[in-house]
């Protein structure tokens, strides 16, 4: 069965420090991987995705994520956190098998990031 | 370019009342989705429409119906609201279902059923 795990409900980091939000996955075949961000009282916004190629993917607002096939992980990172990065972050995965239930996007439960001034 | 729009933004219903949540997108996307978001449960897919004229059940379809009115619009109907349907509802769209296309979300509808 396909699944996504975000092992930390909450991550706290000081402004200016690097941040990491973790995501691990399980799919049949190869994965398409996504990160979304949700600011308070807003809909989700797409941040970045891994489809194929370079394992380091760069996205919006200075975020990047590293695909690690052997560890089945896709952790979100930023070198220097801002207070405005405080939000809820969702990881999602889909299998490259484009049939049946493999077509559906599987969502993690979200990680709340708090960046302290 | 408004993206994905949803109406209403807020709604309070009494148990047993009905209502329709409206969603429209102006990105010429083929696929549309309805999700609900509850604390500790993440996002759960209620129904989706891979293309105009088709709809399919997601994880939690019971108590809901949908209509893909045309390529732009996808509505969600609660026929007889229950307190368990208190949630925040998001509509989303993407170029196609499956594959590598990201989803674009509306601002959400916060529904309370008393």
Image: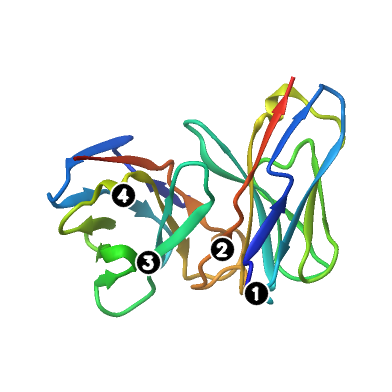
Q: Which residue is identified by label 2?
A: B104
Name of the residue lying farthest toward the bottom:
A53
Comparing labels 1 and 3, the label whose residue is closer to the camera = 1
| Mark seen at residue B57 | none
| Mark seen at residue B27 | 1
| Host chain of mark 4 | A
* Vertical order, B87 against A54 (above or below): above
The answer to whether residue B50 is visible is yes
Tell me the CA gap for discs 4 and 1: 28 Å
Q: Position of residue B78 (x, y in %)?
A: 82, 38
* Vertical order, A17 against B51 (above or below): above
Comparing labels 4 and 1, the label whose residue is closer to the camera = 4
> Seen in the image, is B89 located left or right of residue A9?
right
- The colour scheme of the drawn protein is rainbow
Tell me the CA gap for discs 4 and 3: 18 Å
Name of the residue lying farthest toward the top:
B114
| Host chain of mark 2 | B
Q: Which residue is identified by label 3?
A: A48
């Amino acid at each position: 069965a396909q699944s996504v795990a975000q092992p930390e409900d909450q991550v706290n980091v000081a402004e200016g420090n690097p941040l990491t939000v973790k995501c691990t996955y399980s799919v049949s075949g190869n994965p398409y991987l996504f990160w979304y961000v949700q600011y308070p009282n807003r809909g989700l916004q797409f941040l970045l995705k891994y489809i194929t190629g370079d394992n380091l993917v760069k996205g919006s607002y200075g975020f990047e994520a590293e695909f690690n096939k052997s560890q089945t992980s896709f952790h979100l990172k930023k070198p220097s956190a801002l207070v405005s990065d405080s939000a809820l972050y969702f990881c999602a995965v889909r299998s490259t098998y484009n049939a049946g239930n493999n077509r559906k996007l599987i969502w993690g439960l979200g990680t709340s990031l708090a960046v302290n001034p | 370019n408004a993206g994905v729009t949803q109406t209403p933004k807020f709604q309070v219903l009494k148990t047993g009342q009905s209502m329709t949540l409206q969603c429209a997108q102006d990105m010429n996307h083929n696929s549309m989705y309805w999700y609900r978001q509850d604390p500790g449960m993440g996002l759960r897919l209620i129904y989706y429409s891979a293309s105009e004229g088709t709809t399919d059940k997601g994880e939690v379809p019971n108590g809901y119906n949908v209509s893909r009115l045309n390529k732009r619009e996808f509505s969600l109907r609660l026929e007889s609201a229950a307190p368990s349907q208190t949630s925040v509802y998001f509509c989303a769209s993407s170029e196609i279902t499956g594959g590598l296309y990201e989803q674009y979300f509306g601002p959400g509808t916060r529904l309370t059923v008393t």
